[in-house]
Image (cartoon, rainbow, N blue to C red):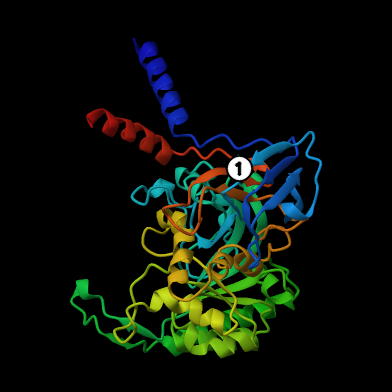
């Protein structure tokens, strides 16, 4: 009886694990593919109305106007996409996808480490390629992401992955691209749930907290020029900020904090710095432009942070910064951020209603994040020699009504667009049909 129960338990667990497993990653591209007749949105502002796109071994070989060339397509797999649209794969930066599956279950939460100073903590090795949430990104065209830790003063080191892989080693696109720092808030609100005054007030410890950051960086530089008889992993991890191999991503929203963060980076000779969040970045846009500092802009679908702000301030921030010459990309952090990451193209679409052209909005989630993350030599635009990471949509991919994917590719590999969500949709749509 005991043996029977053990066998029953084994097969129950086995069937459960199969039912929750992610779609099997796509095999390597084996045949040259040609997509013909689609409107190609290159990602750099260019649009080709009647395009032909050919890729082989995961690399784009031809991207041109079909009416200007005669191509022999013999032996190729031809996908006729007349009336449809082709886009580069969308890129979501500053994301915790794959680090948390169920927020209420601690065993599935690997988003942060204890302690305040963790530059050596690498999010990549915690990235879960079997995440159901990650696979739900692909039907909306979100195919790559920067996986970023949270918490502490220095959260850790991010990496960039593609969203169709067996394990993190297969997923990685750029390993340990940058270190993430949470800059102190110059203002704070009282915790109303503890009976404190919720009104905005000056952070009396701001200068002290900034000094702590300065002291930490001074200690890392002292260590670098020392004998290193004892290895200090956190200090070692920061070396890339000074030799150019890593970017310093500073998470900060207020005007004073952004200004101080820029001055701090310049004083410490940090090779490359990016502002993350940047709610008041438009107030120091000229300073950002002078220092060639990009912004990963907070979620577009948000409420204004300050009482005196325009009601539509989050919607028009991308336009204000773009007009000033700041390189802007959109990120999705905040409440329910992993689920909301699939809405990345629709955040970009909202910026069109507030002043950007559709191709400028597209750049916010393709070319610009690729540049900021340092992967624009391979991803972000549909150009010859780059990765065939792209998708075909029946309509405008920035509009939730018409963003309907028919095919998607990562490095030329044809992806499955089936997810747990699409399975549920099919299941319950049949139930509604039966009832009606």
* Quadrant in which the C terminus appears: top left
Residue 137 screen position, x and y as percent: 49, 49
Quadrant hosting residue 385: bottom right
Q: In this rendering, is residue 309 above or below 418?
A: below
Residue ID for mark 1: 165
Q: Is residue 109 left or right of residue 328?
A: left
Q: Residue furthest toward the top?
A: 1
Whether residue 97 is situated above or below residue 217 in the rendered picture: above
Q: Residue at x 74, y 35 (%)?
A: 30
What quarter of the picture does the N terminus occupy? top left
Please tell me whether residue 329 is drawn above or below residue 210 in the rendered image: above
The percent coordinates of residue 56 (x first, y second) are: 76, 43
Residue 434: image location, x then y, percent: 26, 28
Residue shown at 64% from the left, 41% from the top: 80
Q: In the orientation shown, which residue stands out farthest toward the front? A: 67
- Residue 277 in view of the camera: no
**Element class at badge 1:** loop
- Residue 187 sits in which quadrant? bottom left
Badge 1 crowding class, 10 Å Cα cut-off, few under 14, some 14 to 19, many 20 or more, is many
Is residue 17 in sight in this rendering?
A: yes
Q: Quadrant of residue 151?
A: bottom left
Count numbered badges in the picture.
1
Expressed as whole percent of the image width and height from the top left, the position of residue 371 reads 66, 68
**Seen in the image, is 62 located left or right of residue 111?**
right
Looking at this view, is 159 or 52 the one in front? 52
Between 98 and 31, the one lying in front of the other is: 31
């Amino acid at each position: 009886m005991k043996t029977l129960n053990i066998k029953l338990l084994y097969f129950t667990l086995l069937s459960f694990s199969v039912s929750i497993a992610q779609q099997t990653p796509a095999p390597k591209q084996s045949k040259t593919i040609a997509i013909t007749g689609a409107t190609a949105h290159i990602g750099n502002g260019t649009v080709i109305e009647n395009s032909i796109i050919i890729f082989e071994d995961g690399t784009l070989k031809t991207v041109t106007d079909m009416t200007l060339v005669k191509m022999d397509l013999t032996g190729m797999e031809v996908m006729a996409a007349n009336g449809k649209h082709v886009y580069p794969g969308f890129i979501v930066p500053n994301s915790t996808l794959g680090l948390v599956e169920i927020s209420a279950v601690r065993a599935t939460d690997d988003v942060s480490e204890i302690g305040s100073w963790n530059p050596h903590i690498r999010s990549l090795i915690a990235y879960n390629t079997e995440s159901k949430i990650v696979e739900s990104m692909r039907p909306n065209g979100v195919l790559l992401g920067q996986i970023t830790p949270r918490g502490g003063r220095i959260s850790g080191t991010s990496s960039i992955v593609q969203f169709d892989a067996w394990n993190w080693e297969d997923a990685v696109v750029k390993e340990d691209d940058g270190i993430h720092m949470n800059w102190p808030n110059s203002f704070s609100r009282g915790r109303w749930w503890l009976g404190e005054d919720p009104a905005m007030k000056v952070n009396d410890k701001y200068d002290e907290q900034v000094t702590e950051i300065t002291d930490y960086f001074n200690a890392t530089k002292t260590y670098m020029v020392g004998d290193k008889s004892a290895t200090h992993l956190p200090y070692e991890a920061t070396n890339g900020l000074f030799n150019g191999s890593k970017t310093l991503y500073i998470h900060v929203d207020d005007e004073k904090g952004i200004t101080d963060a820029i001055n701090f980076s310049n004083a410490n000779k940090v090779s490359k710095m990016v502002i993350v969040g940047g709610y008041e970045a438009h107030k120091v846009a000229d300073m950002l432009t002078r220092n060639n500092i990009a912004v990963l802009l907070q979620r577009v679908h948000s409420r204004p942070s300050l009482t005196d702000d325009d009601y539509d301030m989050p919607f028009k921030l991308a336009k204000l910064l773009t007009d000033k010459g700041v390189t802007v990309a959109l990120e999705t952090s905040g409440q329910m951020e992993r689920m909301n990451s699939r809405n990345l193209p629709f955040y970009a679409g909202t910026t069109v209603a507030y002043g950007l052209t559709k191709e400028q909005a597209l750049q916010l989630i393709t070319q610009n994040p690729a540049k900021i993350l340092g992967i624009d030599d391979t991803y972000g635009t549909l150009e010859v020699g780059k990765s065939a990471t792209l998708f075909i949509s029946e309509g405008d991919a920035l509009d939730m009504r018409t963003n309907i994917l028919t095919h998607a590719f990562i490095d030329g590999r044809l992806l499955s667009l089936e997810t747990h969500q699409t399975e549920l949709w099919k299941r319950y749509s049949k139930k509604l049909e039966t009832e009606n």
